[in-house]
Image (tube, helix red, strand yellow):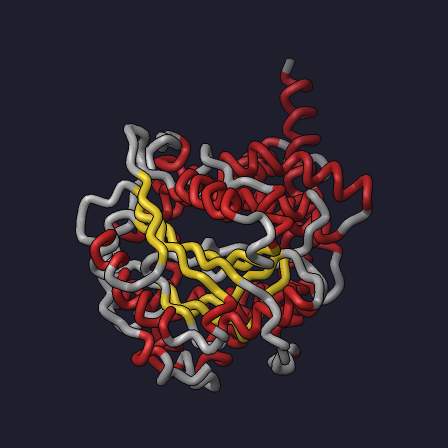
Amino acid sequence: MENFYILFFLISGNVFQFYLILSMIIYLFISVTGIFVYRFKDKKTSYSTKFALLIPAHNEEKVIGNLIESLRMIDYPSNMYDVYIICDHSLDLTEKIAGESGFEVLHYSDNLPSSKARALNLATDDIMSIDKKMYDAFCYFDADSLVHPDFLKVMSYYIENGELAIQGRQIPKNSNESLLSMIVSSSQYITNYFFQKPKEYLGLSATLHGKGMCFAAEVVKRFKWDENCLTEDLEMQMRLINNSIKIRWAEDAIVYDEEPVHTNQYIKRSIRWTKGSLDTAKKHAFNLLTSSVKTLDFKRLEAFIYCFGVYRVLVIFFVGVSIYITKSNFNMLVYIFKNIPYDDILLKFMFLSLPFIIFPASMIFDKMAGFKMFLVYFLQPVLGFFRIPIFLLGIFKDRSIWDKTEHTSAVRISDVLRMKI
C-alpha cells in the first residue's frame, strides 16, 4: 500500500509539475514579448457597422449618469448605433435616470434573483425579435464603465475586416481614489501591456473582461450567456476559443472601469470571480486540453492553462507535498532546476528582473501610470494574503446568488480624457 501511495504522488506530482513548468515558460515568453511590442497602427473605418450597445444595470443610480454622459460623446454616426440600458431588478433611481437619457430602456423584474447573464439573454432575445438583421455587432458595457469617444470607430474597423469577437482595452478610471484602487490599477496596467498586448501580437486570444467587448451578430445569435456561471465573460471566452473563434484585443478601443476602493469590495468581487472561475474550469478545462492536443492549437492550450490557473493554489500545495514524499525519486521541477545551464541567472530573471525591475520600470516611463503607481506596484504582494481564504470561500460560494459590487465613483468622462493613453 505504501508503494501505491508513493507511485500515486510520483505520477500525479510530475504531471502537475509539468503543468507549472509549461505555464511558467509560456507566460514568461508572453511577458518578455510585451517588452518589445509597441503601439499598433491606428485603425481606419468606413463607419459601415451598425451597433447595439447593451448596458445591464442593477441599482446603479450613483454611476449610470456618468456612463450615459460618456455614451453621448461617442464619435460615431448617431444613426449607426442604439443604446439599450437593461434595468435588471433595480429598486433605486437607475430606471428613472436611464429613462431621462433618451436611450432605450428595457425593464426586467420577476421572482428570480438578479443575474447579469440572464438580463443580457432576455434583452438580446427582445432586440433580435424586432429584426434579426438590424445590427452587425453588439457591444457590452457595465453601468460603472465610461466609454472613450473613439470606441465604436475602432470596433467598426475590426468588424468590417471580418473579426467575430473583440475585447477593448480596459483602463481604471478611479486609480487615485484609494491605496487599494491604485494597487489593483497597477495590476491592470501589467495585464494590458505584458499579457493582453503581446498575446494579440503572438496571435493568441485575448481575455474577456465583461465590459468593452464587441461580438459580431452571428456570434450573439449562436452563443447565449451562461446564466449558471458567476463569471459569464470568462465562460464565454473559453467557449468561443473552443469553437475556433479568436478573440482580438483592440488597444485603441478604450473602456474605463471602476476598481474596488475598499477591501470588502475587493474580497466580495474576488470570491465571486473565484466561484465562477472554478465552475468554468470544471466545464471547459479538460475539453480545451484534449482539443488542443487533437488540433495542435496553441490558442486552446494557452486557454487551458489560463482556465486551469484558478487551481494554482492547490496545484502548488500538492506539488510541494508530492516532492517531499517522493524526494528520493524523480521530480521534474527538481531535475530541471538542478541541470538547466545558467539556472541561477534564469531564476533571477524570472523571479526578480521581470516583476521587480522590468514591470515597474515600464510604469515610470508611461505617462498614464506615473510614479505613484510605480510605488504602489510593490504593494501587490499584500493582496496575496487574501488569496487562500478567497479561494476557500469561493469553493463554498452559492452560484445562484450574484453579490453585486457597490459602485460609487464620481469620475466623469471629461476627467479620464485628460489622461495620456
Residue 268 at least partly seen: no
In this rendering, would 211 be left or right of 403?
right
How many numbered circles are shown?
Answer: 0
Q: Can you tell which quarter of the image residue 353 is in?
A: bottom right
Residue 97 appears in the rendering: yes
- Of residue 357 and residue 246, the one placed in the foreground of this image is 246
Q: Kindly indicate the quadrant of the structure image that contains residue 46.
A: bottom right
Identity of the residue drawn at 38% across and 35% down: 392
At 48% across and 62% down in the image, what residue appears?
Answer: 212
User: 148 or 359: which is nearer to us?
Assistant: 148
Q: Nearer the viewer, residue 225 or 234?
A: 225
The percent coordinates of residue 254 (x first, y second) are: 47, 71
Q: Residue furthest top?
A: 1
Q: Residue 53 location, x and y as percent?
A: 45, 59
Measuring from the top left, give residue 297's x and y in whole percent. Answer: 77, 49
In this rendering, the answer to whether 243 lies above or below 93 is above
- Residue 319 in the image: state x and y as whole percent: 58, 39
Q: Is residue 298 above or below residue 82?
A: above
| Screen quadrant of the N terminus | top right
Residue positioned 71% across, 62% down in the render:
162
Relative vertical location of residue 246 with respect to residue 350 in this rendering, above or below: above
Q: Is residue 337 left or right of residue 324?
A: right
Position above or below: 307 against 247: above
Q: Quadrant of residue 309?
A: top right
